[in-house]
Image: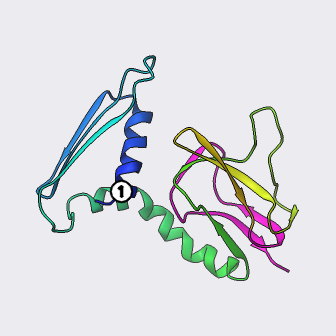
Amino acid sequence: MDIKEIQSLIKFVAKSGASEVKLETDEIKITIRTGSLGNNEPTYVQSIPMAQAPVAHAAPPQEAPSAPAKSTEPEKKEDDSKYITIKSPIIGTFYRKPSPDKPAFVEVGDKISSGDVLCVIEAMKLFNDIESEVSGTIVKVLVDDASPVEFDQPLFLVDPA
């Protein structure tokens, strides 16, 4: 289990409202404790590597939720092959707007330039502006507002023409 998977697990536990979760396999033991919702207590993670073998037990549950999405992606890739995919550089929560009362940074059909802010991703209470590295037109927004995103997850499709 790598650090990204552990961070994802911490976020899942925090959102679920559980106060403590223990995960133990032959290779690793993890305990995650969170304070009650009103206490603002930090999340504690205790990780004790038990062996150097790859984690075989943790992989299937994590891949199961993404399996349906993978089955629809080949159809999209055929249609979207001429577009540039802008991907998330970090793990966090994706927001299309700078604040709830403001308009979205970009909409489908908007022309963008290199350096334009496309969205923000909140990671560990910090809001990170995600800037475009390409110029073109937004063709599709691939993530819903206020959704969790993973590292390297596609966020936008851009037509460079």
The residue sitting at the top extreme is 38
Residue 107 x %, y %: 82, 55
Above or below, comparing residue 66 to residue 15 in the picture: below
Report the colour scheme: rainbow
Residue 17 in which image quadrant? top left
Residue at the spot 69% in from the left edge and 77% down from the top edge = 80
| Residue 21 horizontal/vertical position (percent) | 26, 36
From the viewer's perspective, tell me whether residue 108 is left or right of residue 4.
Answer: right
Q: Observer-nearest residue: 5 or 109?
A: 5
Whole-percent x, y for residue 103 in the image? 83, 42
Q: Nearer the viewer, residue 128 or 153?
A: 128
User: Residue drawn 86% across and 62% down?
Assistant: 109
For the point 87% across and 61% down, the residue is 110
Span highlighted in magenta in the image: 133-161
Report the number of discs: 1
35 w.r.t. 26: above or below: above
Residue 151 magenta-drawn?
yes
**Looking at the rendering, in which quadrant would you find the C terminus?**
bottom right
Hey, which quadrant is residue 33 in on the image?
top left
Is residue 40 or residue 142 the one in the foreground? 40
Left or right of residue 86, residue 2 in this image: left
| Residue under numbered circle 1 | 3
Q: Is residue 43 above or below residue 138?
A: above
Which quadrant is the N terminus positioned in? bottom left
Label 1 crowd bin: few (<14), some (14–19), many (20+), radius 10 Å: few
Q: Residue 48, how many percent across, how many down?
A: 17, 50
Kind of residue at disc 1: Ile
Secondary structure under the numbered disc 1 in the rendered image: helix
Q: Which residue is at 14% across, 58% downward?
A: 27
